[in-house]
């Protein structure tokens, strides 16, 4: 762990260019460094622990790391790469990535770091940690990827080896004995999105692996496991049914294992083999077999169908004598598609001829063995304290360490007892896979049928008793074991965390099935606990109040009133009480208050509550955003092609007459118009709001909380992007909000700037390129309570509310101090749900918000 706790020598960090209205009223050409605007941002109905920053590769979440047996590799290193646009456009960041600074992670950056070493000497005894300390890498002998992989494994085994049994420890020992080239190949394949088949002739690692065939053979070599080495830790009785009943997808080892599988032993059907071929190869095979199709998928189906139907195609065959002697690999546990049941001899030979032909074209292939693959996944789960990680996660800590940055001062705390036992780790892993199975039914496979809903209910019924038990156990820990705030982040690694989300999904399913009484019961139970998924409490209150208002009066077996109207009023009074409770609940986030207030006012009117006793929310009544119009000259370019041959961007190009004949974005044109009216401002899309938040909550961000600072190179705590951040620091945050509301923002900003600007300390969201004078003037123009309301939303849901903030933030001191947020819209643009939410938050806090419509008074073709 030395690599995690060493602190870097302070060094200056370079500035990035900016585009803004300066305090002198001039618009510079380039915008301040900022995040790309997100078109869709998850709301609180979605996972509150997931960030949505746009610049990173797609996640490999633990439950999704399943073998795609019937699919060839889609990775970019394969010539058959066909990564979809959807995959490229849906990147997210993990907790560990979000907490680390922005570092270059391209191939060029990795080469730069590996070439930047203190000495050219080769030390055979060097370890990953020692190379990190001296920044030594030698091409063909060491690699940043392999060092990062081994650092994770070494750290876990040094601190939490009790989570692995004797057979697994033996596999780790065999891993350490692999050659560098075999380890490099395994790690690179491990980072692919699925453990699928890869054609060995198309692996493009020749710069790092001199003999790819030897590395493949080393990984595919069978290795015997020691006998009688099963885990000595028994599964606790309450946990046993869960692990046995649910479809647990964990690694099981018998007498032997391999690190990778051979295609000769495991590809036994034409359907699976044909997916290994490229489009051109499939077309050639289809032409020879005289079948047709519109695309690769249709051609593959036609070939597979023909191989089972058409007679006598001996002309296609290249017979491989080795196929007859294929032997199963004992103990690998890799799923194998059964060969078609033997029919007539001619039919069996026909299929075999096709299989031989396809495998001869594809050549030998490699696939990581599933049990070992999942074992290393478990290592990463323990190391990152997370169920999702990417290639960037694997190298982020090392890249952060060897870069020259200044980090905030905080206490590193990495507990070694997050998983008390191997059984708890296995249950958590199983719970995550079960949660993913539920998500697959609801979200990833098209419209959900009633059969799909019923499968979710069956899963819910299975985990429900265990969920109740875990809630009770965790509540006892909260009361007797955990110190203040210690359990909040740890609970995310408790099986009850995914179980709670399954219960949440089950409540939704009961609603879809019109079983509102059971849905109401689950919502009551979810709200009775205050340990898991606190960010969802607002949505639970909303749904509970709706059910009580509209459905519950007909569902009681023993109603309180025989008269129907009286029974309706009875349940409306209960719904009103639910709304009052929600507004008083400290964990019901501010974004839900407006809808709950509307429902409460409506219920009180229906119940004919005396006016003097009704709630009055006039002080937070929402105002509609103002409508502003800016005219300009729009430029249209013909034959524009987007990146990678995609359709051209829909972003419009404008000419600002007041700034000359150059090309400007629609936001820059509108910003210039506001400047001419006496406003100062930035096109920041939330960047300056995040900067203000970092200034105002600097000390609270780096307050000591156990387990949220796992390395010395973080720019924020690991729980900032989760629903654990706010409740863990509720006292400190609320005290700071009062201070801001009372006008203390300027003093807080000056104190942090004086202390940290010289070092340009790396802090999440903080852009040092914003001038201090502008920040102080902006803070002074904000009403204190309005700025506090904005900060409260950021504190409660930082990860979900980073997007959707209006494009322009503007302020002026004459004729009076005021702030204006402007959302710029050109033709056919619509507000997203998250943008509407921010407009509600800002107008509810008394801040002016405008919808700035860009109107083309002239369109020029260029």
Image: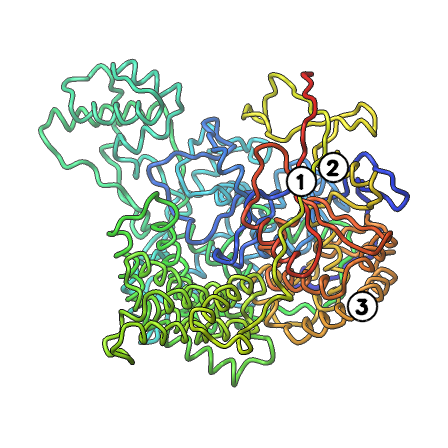
For residue 2, say whether it is visible: no
Among the two numbered marks 3 and 1 on one chain, the one whose residue lies closer to the N terminus: 3
Q: From the viewer's perspective, tell me whether residue 758 is left or right of residue 286.
A: right
Screen quadrant of the C terminus? top right
Residue 824: mark in rendering: 1
| 10 Å crowding of disc 1: few (<14), some (14-19), many (20+) | many
Of residues 610 and 555, the one nearer the viewer is: 610
Q: From the viewer's perspective, tell me whether residue 138 is left or right of residue 439.
A: right
Q: Are the residues at dot 3 and dot 2 in contact (C-beta closer than 8 Å)?
A: no
Q: Position of residue 415 (x, y in %)?
A: 58, 71
Residue at horizontal 66%, vertical 76%? 731
Among the two numbered marks 2 and 1 on one chain, the one whose residue lies closer to the N terminus: 2
C-alpha span from label 2 to label 1: 7 Å
| 10 Å crowding of disc 3: few (<14), some (14-19), many (20+) | some
Q: Dot 2 corresponds to which residue?
A: 670
Q: Dot 3 corresponds to which residue?
A: 743
Image position of 671 with respect to 817: above or below: above
Q: Are the residues at dot 2 and dot 1 in contact (C-beta closer than 8 Å)?
A: yes
| Residue 342 position by quadrant | top left
For residue 323, say whether it is visible: yes
Residue at horizontal 33%, vertical 62%? 227
């Amino acid at each position: 762990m030395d690599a995690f706790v060493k602190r870097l020598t302070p060094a200056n960090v370079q500035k990035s260019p900016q585009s803004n209205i300066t305090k002198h009223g001039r618009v510079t050409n380039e915008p301040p460094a900022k995040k790309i605007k997100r078109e869709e941002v998850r709301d609180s109905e979605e996972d509150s622990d997931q960030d949505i920053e746009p610049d990173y590769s797609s996640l490999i979440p633990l439950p999704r790391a399943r073998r795609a047996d019937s699919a060839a590799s889609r990775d970019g290193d394969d010539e058959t790469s066909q990564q979809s646009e959807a995959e490229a456009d849906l990147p997210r960041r993990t907790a560990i990535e979000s907490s680390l600074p922005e570092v270059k992670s391209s191939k060029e950056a990795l080469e730069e770091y590996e070439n930047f070493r203190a000495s050219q000497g080769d030390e055979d005894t060097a370890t990953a940690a020692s190379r990190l300390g001296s920044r030594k890498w030698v091409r063909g002998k060491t690699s940043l990827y392999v060092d990062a992989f081994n650092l994770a494994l070494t750290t876990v085994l040094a601190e939490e080896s009790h989570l692995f049994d004797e057979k697994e420890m033996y596999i780790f020992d065999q891993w350490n004995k692999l050659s560098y080239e075999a380890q490099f190949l395994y790690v690179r394949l491990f980072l692919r999105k699925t453990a699928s088949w890869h054609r060995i002739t198309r692996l493009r690692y020749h710069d790092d692996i001199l003999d790819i065939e030897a590395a493949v053979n080393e990984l595919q070599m069978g290795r015997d496991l020691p006998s009688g080495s099963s885990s000595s830790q028994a599964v606790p009785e309450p946990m046993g049914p869960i692990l046995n009943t649910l479809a647990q997808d964990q690694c099981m080892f018998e007498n032997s294992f391999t690190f990778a599988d051979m295609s000769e032993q495991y590809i036994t059907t034409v359907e699976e083999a044909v997916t290994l071929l490229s489009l051109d190869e499939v077309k050639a095979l289809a032409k020879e077999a005289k079948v047709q199709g519109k695309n690769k998928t249709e051609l593959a189906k036609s070939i597979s169908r023909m191989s089972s139907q058409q007679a006598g195609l001996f002309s296609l065959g290249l017979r491989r004598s080795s196929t007859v002697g294929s032997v199963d690999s004992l103990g690998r546990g890799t799923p194998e598609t059964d060969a078609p049941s033997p029919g007539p001899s001619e039919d069996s030979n026909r299929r075999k001829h096709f299989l031989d032909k396809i495998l001869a074209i594809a050549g030998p292939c490699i696939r990581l063995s599933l049990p070992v693959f999942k074992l290393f996944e478990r290592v990463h789960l323990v190391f990152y304290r997370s169920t999702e990680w990417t290639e960037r996660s694997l190298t982020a800590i090392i890249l952060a360490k060897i870069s020259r940055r200044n980090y905030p001062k905080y206490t590193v705390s990495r507990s070694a007892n997050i998983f008390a036992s191997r059984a708890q780790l296995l249950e958590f892993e199983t719970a995550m896979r079960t949660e993913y199975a539920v998500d697959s039914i609801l979200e990833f496979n098209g419209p959900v049928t009633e059969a799909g809903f019923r499968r979710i209910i069956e899963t819910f019924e299975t985990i429900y008793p265990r969920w109740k038990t875990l809630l009770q156990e965790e509540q006892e820990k909260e009361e007797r074991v955990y110190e203040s705030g210690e359990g909040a982040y740890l609970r995310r690694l408790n099986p009850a965390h995914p179980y709670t989300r399954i219960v949440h999904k089950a409540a939704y399913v009961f609603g879809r099935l019109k079983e509102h009484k059971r849905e109401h019961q689950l919502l009551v139970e979810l709200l009775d606990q205050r340990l898991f998924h606190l960010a969802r409490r607002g949505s639970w209150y909303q749904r509970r109040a709706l059910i009580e208002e509209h459905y519950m009066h007909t569902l009681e077996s023993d109603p309180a009133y025989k008269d129907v109207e009286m029974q309706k009023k009875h349940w409306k009074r209960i719904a009103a009480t639910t709304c009052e409770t929600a507004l008083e609940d400290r964990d019901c986030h501010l974004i839900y208050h407006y809808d709950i207030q509307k429902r409460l006012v409506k219920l009180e009117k229906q119940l004919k509550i005396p006016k003097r006793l009704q709630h009055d929310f006039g002080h937070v009544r929402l105002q509609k955003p103002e409508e502003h119009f800016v005219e300009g000259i729009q430029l249209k370019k013909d034959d524009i092609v987007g990146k990678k041959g995609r359709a051209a961007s829909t972003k419009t190009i404008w000419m600002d007459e007041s700034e000359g004949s150059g090309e400007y974005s629609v936001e820059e044109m509108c910003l210039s118009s506001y400047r001419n009216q006496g406003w100062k401002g930035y096109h920041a899309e939330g960047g300056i709001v995040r900067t203000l938040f970092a200034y105002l909550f600097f000390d609270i961000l780096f307050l000591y909380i156990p387990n949220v600072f796992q390395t010395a190179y973080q720019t924020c705590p690991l729980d900032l992007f989760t629903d654990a951040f706010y409740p863990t620091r509720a006292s400190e945050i609320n005290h700071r909000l009062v201070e801001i509301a009372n006008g203390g923002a300027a003093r807080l900003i000056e104190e942090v700037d004086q202390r940290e600007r010289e070092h340009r300390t790396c802090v999440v969201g903080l852009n040092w390129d914003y001038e201090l004078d502008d920040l102080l003037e902006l803070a002074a123009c904000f009403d204190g309570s309005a700025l506090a309301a904005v900060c409260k939303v950021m504190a409660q849901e930082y990860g979900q509310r980073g997007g959707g903030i209006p494009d322009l933030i503007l302020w002026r001191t004459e004729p009076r101090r005021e702030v204006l947020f402007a959302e710029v819209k050109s033709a056919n643009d619509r507000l997203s749900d998250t943008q509407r939410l921010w407009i509600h938050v800002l107008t509810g806090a008394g801040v002016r918000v405008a919808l700035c419509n860009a109107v083309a008074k002239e369109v020029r073709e260029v």
